[in-house]
Amino acid sequence: MAVIRKESLAEKGDSPVLCYNCSAALSAISKTHQGQNIIMWICEFCDHPNCMNPATVPSRPLNDAVYALEWQRDRVDVEDALIVFCVDISGSMSVTSEVKGSKERSRSEHVSRLQCVKNGIMKSLQFLRQQSPRARVGLVTFNDEVTVFGGGLSSPLTLTDYELMDLDYLQERGRLYPTPQSIAETMSSLSRRVNEMIGCGATALGPAAVIAIEMAAKQVGSKVIVCTDGLANTGLGFLDSMEDELCESGSYFYTHLSETASTLGVVVSVLTFEGTDCRLAEVGKLADRTGGRVEIVNPGSLSHELQSILEDDVMATNMTLQFYVAKDMYFRYEEQVGNKLVREIGNVTKDAEITFEFGIKEADPSTIQQKRETFPFQLQADFTTRDQRRVRRIISHEKYITMNRAFVEDSINVMVLGVHAAQLSARLTMERRGGEAQRGVQAHTSLIRDIVEKKQNKEEEDIYENWMGAVASICEDAMGPCELEGDAGNIDSTVTVHGSALKGFSDEMMNAIFRMKNAKTKMLRKSNKTKN
């Protein structure tokens, strides 16, 4: 994420000059007036007059600055990454599928899901030992029981029966279990534990996820990778029921656990298999809220997906964004009213992209141009770096106002517009605002098509084609069920069914929605490269 990749940090003690009313920051686009012993700044975002002591005002305000908010005495070594594999070893993981042969193996063969997971983890361990020998890897397995192996050197911890229903007890067991040593030291023991996994029994997914997250929380920015193929049917997070009360209880559990993981700075990814039902609408929350991935994989691609997750580095945790626009503007599709938007992001990985959409309040935009020449914008990003520094980056910018539609269309980045349309439609669909989502996709698709046709640019034509194939069609399919439930555009109807709003979505549908909600420009570029 580009907001985090600024090399120079301000010295300890530096702090931004903020508006007393809206907390926007003084920057190079601000207009100040020197008075007698004071400096006056009329905030460009709320028009509040700020009287400031000249000694507190920087001589040359910046449009891009980073400030140190908190410094930890004990700095964390970012090379000591912590990854916990949380693996389903229930009976259904013994089901076999045909896996096509590779270059080394020409014949296809039938391989169990569990064997595919074993192969994938073994390749991941080898990758980590070569690329990140100081990384620490832990293993947690679950069926009727939850077994904690950690790095494989300590005695395994097995939890069963009533223990799987006690959240506080599970969290304590996870916190107290020894932290794994480096993969260079545990490779042999972990490999043995992985190869000894045998599939049998039920699926205590919820308790295992609690344990794995607490283990991983010892290192901010750590990862938990859940591999499963069935509904959680034992212990906390029970989902194998269509009764509303049990569904709501399970939904609340995964919502609460995802918030806990995000607060702890743990990124959770969930991998399931094609043709299975894991209730991704609920379990997928763990990944959606923490910045992880949700993927339905075929057995032959599991190793590739695991490596992609390992390579997507965690850049920051506990991120909060504040975005300011001019008083004459507002944020579309947001519940917050006004020209300031606050969004809790949580964990941020290297490839994360976050988009916003705003509009002009005036029915006739030309009246705005009569009053001002530019619009100000400011983004304030507060986050914790991997080495535990709490910082704030403030980026300010202003754009000239124009009524020339052709000029605006020429400057639009089609890639960014496509990513935004995907993220927005998925978010609205998850909120049961299907009507708004559908209208938004149609409007964005029409705009992208018009821009591409006008520019006659081969690269952007390819982007549009990829957008239609990879995004628009999926969004259209994903939004379909929303129209079956009354007024899909009514926001209030979504709030009353928060616990089970996504109950009717299949795993395939939720997989598409999660992918769109986390859409990235490389999704379109990747398709383009593949074609060439």
Image (cartoon, rainbow, N blue to C red):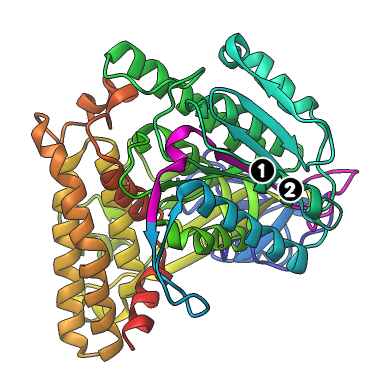
The reply to whether the C-beta atoms of the residues labelled 1 and 2 are less than 8 Å apart is: yes
Q: How many numbered marks does the figure carry? A: 2
Q: Which mark is residue 196?
A: 1
**Relative to residue 356, is residue 176 drawn left or right?**
right
Q: Which mark is residue 192?
A: 2
The residue under the point 83% across, 49% down is 76
Q: Which amino acid type corresponds to the residue marked 2 in the rendered image?
A: Arg
Q: Is residue 362 magenta?
A: no
> Quadrant of residue 373 in the image?
bottom left
Q: Residues within 10 Å of mark 1 (few under 14, many from 20)?
A: few
Tell me if 20 is positioned left or right of 99 in this view.
right
Dot 1 falls on a residue whose secondary structure is loop
* Visible residue check, residue 511: yes
Based on the picture, tell me whether residue 90 belongs to the magenta stretch.
Answer: yes
Q: Secondary structure at mark 2?
A: helix
**Residue at x 25%, y 28% (from the top left corner):** 494
In magenta, the rendered stretch is: 70-97
